[in-house]
Image (spheres, grey):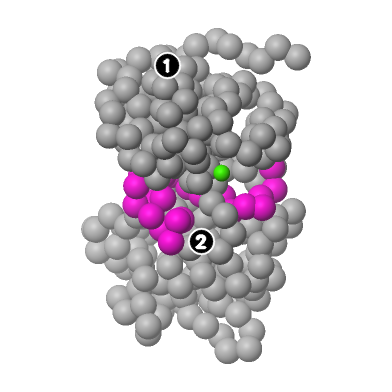
Amino acid sequence: MKPERTPTEAASATGSERGPVERRKILVVEDEPDILELVRVALEAEGFAVVGAGDGELGWALARRERPAAIVLDLMLPKLGGLELCKRIRGARETERIPVVVLTARGTETDKVVGLEMGADDYVTKPFSPRELAARVKAVLRRAYEAPADRPHEVYEKGPLRIDFDSWETRLDGRRIELSLREFELLKFFVTHPNRVFERGQLLDLVWGRDTFVEPRTVDVHIRRLRQRIERDGSMPELIVTVRGVGYMFDERGLGV
Ligand code: CA
């Protein structure tokens, strides 16, 4: 099957300086051939064309030359590390707007945090489900390139909290809150199902999807991070409350309305 190769004009959101990008081309920077192959197969199954790079220096060269629509980036790379590469991508005009999904090893929480601070748009923890990775890539592409629709944005607004589901923007007291894709999806799920208690397993099924390899503890980690971002006092949550022995609930009363 021949991948679609039509160059697409960059959507207005990406600015004109960047020029056209190949909407279906994804650069994957990964030094382990088996993982590169796994990612390639998953992305090609979704109709993407994949360009692979086995080290950071080659990844940097291809990021500029190939003008990919998105980059999947392993962090542990020979020649030039993934974090350094991510910083370069964000620092150069021709690549600064290319969305980056970082691959991290299991249990390296710092890598994820540092990756997001370096400007990655999302991360996937190894071992990952290829379908999950493809879904994340599609989501970052949607966020980066979809032209704003004519219809009004779908918005949740109560008290100090405002969430725009179309532009993926979250504001609290007017202040913009930076959330990872998963944190955003979790918050979106909570605000659209308020005042109901969900067990960890339910949240995993409903927010992460059944076919992902994540432990229930992952839910706690994301909830902790989400609380740090949206609660007035992360240690005394009023919005995402723990219902002891059961799970978590989004309590709209915490918004003071
Ligand atoms: Ca590696």
What element does badge 2 sit on? loop
Left or right: 214 in relation to 188: right
Q: Is mark 1 within 8 Å of ligand 1?
A: no
**Location of residue 220 (image quadrant):** bottom right
Asked if residue 127 is among those painted magenta in the image, a careful observer would answer yes
Give percent across and percent down for residue 35: 67, 39
Which residue carries the number 2 mark? Answer: 108
**Location of residue 14 (image quadrant):** top left
What element does badge 1 sit on? helix
Give percent across and percent down for residue 19: 35, 15
Q: In which quarter of the image is the N terminus?
A: top right
Ligand 1 sits in which quadrant?
top right
> What residue appears at the point 66 percent right and 52 percent down from the top-left corner?
127
> What residue appears at the point 28 percent right and 55 percent down from the top-left corner?
176
> What residue appears at the point 52 percent right and 83 percent down from the top-left corner?
242
Q: Give the range drawn in magenta.
A: 110-130
> What residue appears at the point 67 percent right and 30 percent down from the top-left corner?
40
Q: Quadrant of the C terminus?
A: bottom left
Crowd around label 2: few <14 · some 14–19 · many ≥20 (10 Å): few
Amino acid beneath label 2: Thr
The dot on residue 65 is 1
